[in-house]
């Protein structure tokens, strides 16, 4: 009887979150919960440059941009995107965007830039096809967009569905603090990723 309940539980998880080969057990649920928790925080949108510590550095908790939603959510799971991105960037500087006039890595800001994160996730995570099929985007997935203004944007897919039940919602920060919204296809999607870092049972290859 216990085995039957176990298989029912596993099957239910696959139905809710989709099957993803190689995903650490419970990862998508935990990162989704961490992102949802961000929506309860009052954050003023502020992308100004600040000097922060390394590793584990952060801007003041009451401020942030879209990338900080990811950074703070991943840290709940013990994954430091500041450190992970820096370790890859410092040895592969030429592979990252050259749009800010930098001549060396900067741990204060590199991980907070969407274009850098997209390169990093492509290199060290899993880059998935960009489609217009809602079923391809599952809780825990990272999505990047190009806004009508031309600016890049990034957010996390979470385990809450749209009113019509056809797609998962997004936690992101677009000038109003972390919010849960039905915006997956509201902007031009430029990237679709999964990243597990050094989550238990995984090896990012960066340490």
Image: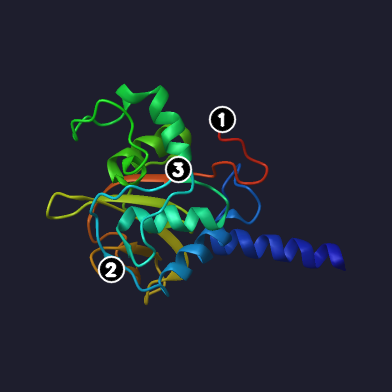
Q: Residue at x 49, y 44 (%)?
A: 195
Label 2 element class = strand
Q: In the current view of this chain or complex, which residue is farthest to the left?
A: 149
Decide which of 120, 157 is in the foreground and name it: 120
The residue labelled by disc 3 is 54
Mark toward the start of the polypeptide (1 vs 2): 2
Cα separation between marks 2 and 3: 23 Å
Check whether the beta carbons of the residues at disc 1 and disc 2 lie within 8 A of each other. no
Label 3 element class = loop
Mark 3 crowd level (few <14, some 14–19, many ≥20, 10 Å Cα): few
Residue 44 image label: 2
Q: Residue at x 23, y 53 (%)?
A: 48
The residue labelled by disc 1 is 205
In the image: residue 165, left or right of residue 75: left
In the image: residue 46, left or right of residue 191: left
- Name the quarter where the C terminus is drawn: top right
Q: Is residue 202 above or below residue 140?
A: above
Label 1 element class = loop
């Amino acid at each position: 009887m216990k085995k039957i309940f176990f298989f029912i539980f596993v099957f239910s998880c696959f139905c809710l979150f989709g099957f993803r080969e190689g995903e650490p057990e419970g990862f998508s649920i935990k990162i989704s919960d961490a992102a949802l928790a961000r929506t309860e925080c009052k954050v003023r949108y502020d992308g100004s440059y600040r000097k922060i510590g390394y590793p584990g550095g952060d801007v003041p908790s009451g401020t942030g941009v879209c990338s900080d939603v990811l950074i703070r959510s991943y840290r709940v799971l013990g994954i430091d995107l500041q450190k992970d991105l820096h370790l890859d960037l410092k040895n592969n500087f030429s592979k990252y965007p050259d749009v800010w006039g930098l001549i060396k890595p900067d741990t204060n800001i590199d991980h907070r830039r969407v274009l850098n994160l997209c390169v990093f996730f492509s290199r060290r995570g899993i880059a998935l096809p960009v489609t217009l099929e809602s079923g391809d985007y599952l809780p825990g997935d990272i999505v990047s967009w190009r806004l009508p203004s031309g600016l890049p944007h990034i957010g996390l897919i979470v385990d809450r569905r749209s009113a019509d039940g056809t797609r998962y919602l997004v936690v992101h920060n677009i000038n109003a603090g972390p919010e849960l919204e039905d915006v997956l296809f509201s902007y031009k999607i430029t990237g679709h990723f999964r990243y597990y870092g050094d989550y238990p049972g995984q090896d990012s290859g960066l340490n």
